[in-house]
Image (cartoon, grey):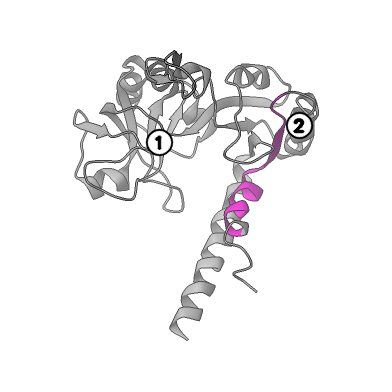
Amino acid sequence: LSLMMILMSFFAISDEANASTRIFNRIACLNANGFAGKLPIARVGEIAQLDGVVAVTPFNWVGGKYRDEIMPFAQFAIDPNAVFNVMNELTVPPGELKSFQENKDGCAIGRKLAQDKKLKVGDKLPLKGDAYPVDLDRTVRCIYDGPSNRDLRMCLLRWDYFDESLKKVVFRSSSSTAIQPASARTSGNAGMIFIKCKTADDMAPLCKTIDDRYRNSEFPCRTQTEEAFGKMFEEMLGDLKG
């Protein structure tokens, strides 16, 4: 009975959190093949030029490990000049935001993550490479806050610095002794693209426009509302409701 109540509460809270994103007029674009697929970073600028778009940021999962922790907290490589325009419900002191935008080694973390890890502005935040073969020594430049139903445990890194770090890594080819730049495999990837729309009426047409534009490209994409994107994670659990 306790397990059933926990599961039912999980779905209820998840549905409520997903529904609460409707007011922000955001859509999410990812590769049509899922999270493992690639989205070229050039698409961020191309989508930003479309009618009805307010702001756009890449959202690339980093997945580094902090100290000896086994489970990583959420880390994303983003555009520091756009991310808080896309996620405009999040707030950050102007001085701290400017520092984050001007320092490539910086990161922005949520208030709850700062409390959990006992971090403050100016502290080092070393991340050992796991999902990607790079170790990143970050410095906390700003701490953002927001409503209680938003994710205040994220770590946001500068995408340009993350990509530069990837390009410095080399792989040895399995078929020869030649060295292959990591940029041929892992850099230049936006991961996902989060888009802030002017109005709710712009969301559906933009989803269709973006998907149609890249349908016959090497990297076709799937664009959906932020609410639908959130519900994807429930689907990944399989038929748990059943």
Compare residues 118 and 188 and report the one nearer the observer.
188
151 or 157, nearer to the observer: 157
Of labels 1 and 2, the one closer to you? 2
Residue marked by disc 1: 91
Q: Measuring from the top left, give residue 238's x and y in whole percent.
A: 61, 63
- Residue at 27%, 27% in the rendered image: 138
Q: Does label 1 or label 2 sit earlier along the sequence? A: 1
In the image, residue 102 above or below residue 60? above
Residue span colored magenta: 218-234
Secondary structure under the numbered disc 1 in the rendered image: loop
- 119 to the left or right of 81: left
| Residue under numbered circle 2 | 211
Badge 1: how crowded within 10 Å, few (<14), some, or many (20+)?
some
Answer few, some or many: residues within 10 Å of disc 2's Cα (few below 14, many 20 plus, some between 14 and 19). Answer: some
Estimate the x, y position of residue 181 in percent, counting from the top left: 45, 15
Q: Residue at x 51, y 73 (%)?
A: 7
Residue 226 as seen in the image, left or right of residue 187: right
Residue sitting farthest toward the front? 176
The amino acid on which the numbered mark 2 sits, given as a three-letter code, is Asp
Q: Quadrant of the C terminus?
A: bottom right
Residue 138, placed above or below residue 2:
above
x then y, percent, for residue 111 = 31, 43
Q: How many marks?
A: 2
